[in-house]
Amino acid sequence: MSAIDDLPPLRAVIATHGLSAKKALGQNFLLDLNLTAKIARAAGDLAGSDVLEIGPGPGGLTRGLLAEGARHVVAVEKDPRCLPALDEIAAAYPGRLTVIEGDALSLDLTQYLTPPVRIAANLPYNVGTELLTRWLDPPDWPPFWESMTLMFQREVAERITAGPGSKAYGRLSVLANWRTDARIVMDLPPEAFTPPPKVRSAVVRLTRLEAPRFPADAKVLTGVVKAAFGQRRKMLRAALKGLAPDIEDRITAAGLKPTARAEEISVEGFCALAREMTR
């Protein structure tokens, strides 16, 4: 018996189904069910919520989410080898787990979910940032989810939560902090995983804001931030010169210094500049 349910320990599940982690799929399995339950608790009160999980693998976090009371878990798995193990979890939690085989980048998953929705996942390293960017930048805000509790490489987690003036501060920081409250809630060492990755990992909790922190057109803001950090060593007037012939005047009108660099500009400052770009 494991610590959280009556299903076999994850090492036994992996051995039974021959689930060696595939580097090509960005897989690193977290086998300690006490840790997966801790991650599930970091996602908040799951009772009454649907939870979307990407890349469940053998189902460690899936079991944590269900044991912590998630109303319904929708788990999207690309690796068909993992499906029998996930089917066993579905049988142990009747009616509360839906497993979808496929690539999360190409699926409309909202059709399987009933609000309120939370996202919780040990994201595959090779698609984690792209999925996060999509969830943070939907066509309409607020999005379908209320919170996201996601595991990343520690370096990526620091980029998500960084503030101005740090080397980690960049496009992802601005996007995340414009529309959410983002913070690191847990650190995990390499030895917590099988196989151990070469880097540390961290869990980030992002709670959506009902409206963005400062007014700005999302597409314009994204363009400004992309250009600014695309040449982050340059001053704003040089990095953004391709956006408008009078870019220096617009930077000044936004209350910023044309000689400043991207990493010095707050989210509020970028939003002010985005508004100037639409005048």
Image (tube, rainbow, N blue to C red):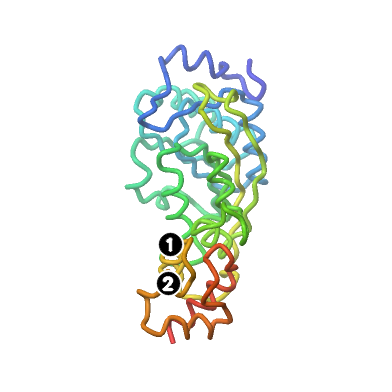
Residue at x-position 62% and y-position 29%: 189
* Residue 24 relative to residue 235: left or right: left
- The answer to whether 160 is drawn above or below residue 85 in the figure is below
Residue 20: x and y, percent? 42, 19
- Secondary structure under tag 2 reads helix
Disc 1 residue type (three-letter): Gln
Q: Quadrant of residue 163?
A: bottom right
* Neighbourhood count class around disc 2 (C-alpha, 10 Å): few under 14, some 14–19, many 20 upward: some
Disc 2 residue type (three-letter): Ala
- Secondary structure under tag 1 reads loop
Q: Quadrant of residue 125?
A: top left
Q: Between residues 239 and 124, which one lies in front from this camera angle?
A: 239
**Tag 2–tag 1 contact (CB < 8 Å):** yes
Labels 2 and 1: the sequence-earlier one: 1
Q: What is the quadrant of the N terminus in the image?
A: top right
- The answer to whether 25 is drawn above or below residue 112 in the figure is above
Residue at x-position 34% and y-position 41%: 103
Q: Which residue is mark 1?
A: 231
Q: What is the quadrant of the C terminus in the image?
A: bottom left
Residue at x-position 56% and y-position 16%: 8
Q: Which residue is mark 2?
A: 238
* Residue 251 relative to residue 227: left or right: right
* Neighbourhood count class around disc 1 (C-alpha, 10 Å): few under 14, some 14–19, many 20 upward: some
